[in-house]
Image: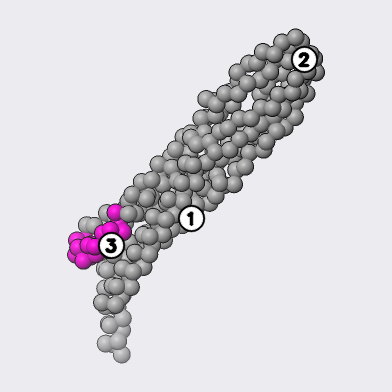
Amino acid sequence: MSESRSQSTAADKESSNLVLFAIFAFGTCGSFSAETGATVKCTKLPKETTAITVQFGYPFRLYKIPFDMPDCIEGSTAKRVLHLMGDFSAPAEFFVTLGVFAFLYSMAALAVYLRFHSLYKENKKLPFADFCVSVSFTFFWLVAFSAWGKGLSDVKGATRPSSLIAAMSVCQFKNALCNAGATPSMGLANISVLFGFFNFILWAGNCWFVFKETPWHAQTTNKESSAEQGAVDKQ
């Protein structure tokens, strides 16, 4: 009886951690925003200096984010509308969506553990289904944090000031001097990848706790007990 209670307590704590870290994962990624920039100084009249600041964030459809580039044509103050390059929404949205579903499932599992644990123990299908879902979430978290880590690396490359300068045609000629502006602060996005890795580890550990509730573990335990009892009887 005490072993069953200790297993239940461990499962409760594990589910609580799953809920918490799922929130951290989709929260840090879904709420991320930053800005990049550059300065363009026209060398011909009217010799204006333009500070370009571009804000971006989740879901990282950068090709939809506009910014104004001065033409630097003598006697003109006209500007052209350009866009950042790249679409990295797929890995980011998959990461956030997985976090939301992991949060919802963990909340439901925690409610079952706390309020209906006796039913969970009696119904052999529930632990089996829980184990299959846990294995699936473990695999999806591995894919999600790996894909988002690669996507974030591409986002960093596309939003650094040097990439912004390279995308502006006016910076390729002598009638303008371009310098790097604000460098994006990517700390929160880096933390989101780290939380994705933590979720993978937690779900892998959760698989073991759930496996101990399945008939497979009970059969293995019974066989080991029978083997030990047989060895004792022979002595």
Magenta-span inclusion, residue 206: no
Q: Is residue 117 left or right of residue 189?
A: left
Specify the farthest residue to the top: 75
* Residue interval drawn in magenta: 108-124
Color theme of the render:
one colour
Residue flagged by tag 3: what amino acid is it?
Answer: Tyr
Q: CA distance from mark 2 to mark 1?
A: 55 Å
Labels 2 & 1 near each other (Cβ < 8 A): no
Amino acid found under the numbered disc labelled 2:
Pro
Q: Is residue 3 above or below residue 184?
A: below
Task: Tell me if 24 is positioned left or right of 188 in this view.
Answer: left
**For mark 3, what is the residue?**
113
Q: Nearer the viewer, residue 66 or 13?
A: 66
The quarter of the rendered structure image containing the N terminus is bottom left
Graded by Cα atoms within 10 Å as few (under 14), some (14 to 19) or many (20 or more), the crowding at tag 3 reads some
Q: How many marks?
A: 3
Q: Quadrant of residue 157?
A: top right
The residue positioned 74% from the left and 11% from the top of the image is 73
Can residue 18 be seen at all in this image of the molecule? Answer: yes
120, above or below 186, in the image:
below
Q: Which residue is mark 2?
A: 46
Give percent across and percent down for residue 109. 30, 56
Q: Between marks 1 and 3, how big is the CA–CA gap?
A: 22 Å
Sequence-earlier tag: 1 or 3: 3
Residue situated in front as seen by the camera: 48 or 215:
48
Left or right side of 89 for 118: left
Residue at the location (72% across, 27% down)? 39
Q: Nearer the viewer, mark 2 or mark 3?
A: 2
Question: Mark number for residue 198?
Answer: 1
Question: In terms of secondary structure, what is the magenta stretch mainly?
Answer: helix
First in sequence: mark 2 vs mark 1:
2
